[in-house]
Amino acid sequence: MTVLDRTSGSSRASSASTANPGGGAPALVVVAHGSRDPRALSTVRALLDRVRELRPALPVHLGHIELNEPLLPGTLAALGDTEAVLVPLLLSRGYHVKRDIPEMAAAVPARTRVAAALGPHPLLVEALYDRLLEAGWDAAHRRGSAVVLAAAGSRDPESRADTGRTARLLAERLGVPVVPAYASATAPTVPEAVRALTARGHHRVAIASYFTAPGRFATECAAAAPWIAAAPLGTHPAMARLLLHRYDEALRTSSTAALELASA
C-alpha cells in the first residue's frame, strides 16, 4: 500500500482510526478505470450503492482514471484537504496502481493514502465461482472441464503474477485446471488458451470473466467461449465487501506505521 499523507507523524498517531478533524472516518474514494461502454459506469455506481448499504455512515465517492466523469482529480479536489483512502477498482498491480493513482493523489490538497489493488484475494474467487455457477457451471461433471480466466492484461510482471495467483486459487476451488489469458498486452490470448486446453483433452472449456464491469474486453473474451462464459464480477456482494476490506486494511497499515513513528 502507498501512503501519501501530509500530516505529521505525531498527528497521525493521535487517533487509531485516523479520522478526519470533524470526527468522521476518512472518505472512501473508489477509483475505477473508466470505459466507453455505458454499462460499465452504471455497474460501478450500483456497486458503490452496495458499499454504502454495508456502511451507511462512510462517505463514499467515485473517481475515474480516464474516459468517464467524475475523473479522479476532480473528485479529490472537491474533498479539499480532508482525509481519504483511495481504493483501486482494479484486480491486480500495474501501472495505474503504481503510478497513475498516486501521482493524481499527490497533486491535490486532500490527505490521501492508496490502498492495494483488489486482487488476488479469496473474495474475488468467491465472486468468480458464483458467476460461473450462474452461467451454468456444473460442479458434478468436472471431468473433462477446464476454465480460462480472462483478464485485461498488462506488461507489468507483477500484474501477471497477481492474475496467475487468482487462477491458482480458482483452480483449487473448482477442482479443474484454470489458465489465465488476456485481452491485450500479453499472452496467451483467450482463444489461444481455449485451443491449448482443448488440445489437452478438455471438451468443456468455460470463460471466467475477470473484469470488474461489462466492456469491450469482457465482451470480446466472452465471444471466444466454446461452452459457457460467466458475467463480469460487477455488483457481486463479495466485491463490495472487498472494497471495504481494502479500505480498512489501508487504515490499519497507516495507523500502525504512525504509531511506530511516534514511538521511535
Image (cartoon, rainbow, N blue to C red):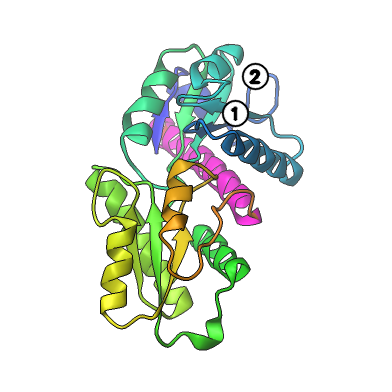
As helix, strand or loop, the secondary structure at mark 2 comes to loop
Q: Residue at horizontal 26%, vertical 80%?
A: 200
Q: Which amino acid, mark 1?
A: Leu
Q: Residue at horizontal 41%, vertical 27%?
A: 101
Residue matched to label 1 = 62
Residue 199 quadrant: bottom left
Do we see residue 10 in this rendering? yes
Q: Indicate the position of residue 240 as horizontal and vertical percent values.
A: 63, 48
Q: Indicate the position of residue 107 as horizontal and vertical percent values.
A: 41, 13
Q: Indicate the position of residue 150 as horizontal and vertical percent values.
A: 40, 56
User: In this picture, which residue range is highlighted in magenta?
Assistant: 237-262
Residue matched to label 2 = 21
Q: Residues within 10 Å of mark 1 (few under 14, many from 20)?
A: many
**Left/right of residue 151 with respect to residue 82 in the rendered view:** left
**Left/right of residue 156 with respect to residue 263 in the rendered view:** left
Q: Quadrant of the N terminus?
A: top left
